[in-house]
Amino acid sequence: MTEEQTGTAARSEAADAADDRVTVVVITHDRRPELLRTLRIMSALPERPPVVVTDNASRDGTARAVAREFPDVRLLRPGRNLGAIGRNLAVTRVRTPYVAFCDDDTWWEPGSLRRAADLLDRAPGLAAVTARIVVEPSGEEDPVVAELRDSPLTGPDWLPGPALGSFLAAATVMRVDAFREAGGFHPGLWLGGEEELLATDLMRRGWWLSYAQELTIHHAASTVRDSTGRRVDGLRNTLWFTWLRRPLTPALRRTGHLMRTVPRDRASVRAFLRAAAGLPWVLKQRDPVPPEIEARLAALEKARRASTARRYVG
């Protein structure tokens, strides 16, 4: 066997070997078929990652099905719907240096978890890498990928791709120490755009976030998703994040822009009313970011206004 053939064989063997650096964390609620499909795919990955599932009080037999069909999966049943905080609970069980977040309707492509761990190994200041998202069954890139690839932020040369100011929890591998240092997902936001606050708290602690084109995750959107409910929660959380972390003038400006541009319907009214109801706790916890972080947030806000991937509709 030639030296080249030996090297190729070694790389192939490494690609097929288990990898003990990444744990997959999934949250789910009443989406048993989608979750079981995701777990079947995760169990076949060459990395053979440990998987932790937080069942957010499903009523469709999800927990029983997981326990029966995937006995090796660590199943957590908190007894109520924790939303994104179900990920915090799952990470308390993680013993690997990295955690791959995954929704019940997304799944990682073979080899991507290994490559993500390699990227994080090489960059100690990197908190997270976000993958390219492929929509199924069409096989097309999610429109948000262009926003990630064309991020207006600049970062150090050692980043594996464009610097990001936020991430997508369904498509990101994160350093567990960084996640814990920043406190995980904020319990006040529950679910819907909850990543923005955690990303900002990571950045103000000196961590970097990056898009990594060589990583891929697949997304087959659940047919039982409540798009209107998610829009209400997402807009509410956008407003709460704005007043939790943005300085006064940018917070006023962003709030005004949202009031002028969101659809004029009942869902938007509900979102603003819910945001207003939470103002007492938001203002109590308000902690605006320093100017260098605000500059990044302002650049992201400007870029997102031109994006077709983020609209408060549904």
Image (cartoon, helix red, strand yellow):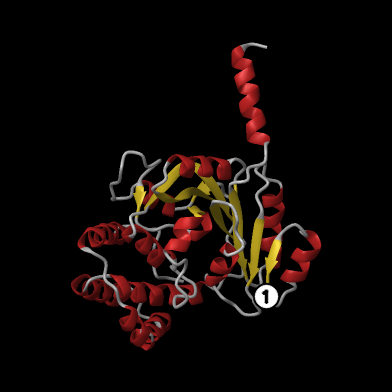
Residue annotated with mark 1: 58
Residue 107 in view here: no
Q: Is residue 183 above or below residue 44?
A: below
Q: Of residues 168 and 313, which is closer to you in this image?
A: 168
Q: Which is nearer the eye, 198 or 133?
A: 198
Spot occupied by residue 250 in the image (x, y as percentages of width and height): 22, 70
Residue depicted at x 47% and y 66%: 184
Residue 272 image position (x, y, % from top left):
36, 83
Which residue sits at x=37%, y=42%? Answer: 159
Classify residue 57 as left or right of residue 180. Answer: right
Secondary element type, mark 1: loop
Q: Which of 144/86 is in front?
A: 86
Residue found farthest to the left: 249
* In this picture, residue 236 sits left or right of residue 259: right
Residue appearing at x 61%, y 22% in the figure: 8
Q: Name which residue type carries label 1.
A: Ser
Q: Is residue 213 above or below residue 196?
A: above
Q: Residue 308 location, x and y as percent?
A: 37, 58
Q: Who's the residue at 42% across and 42% down the image? A: 123
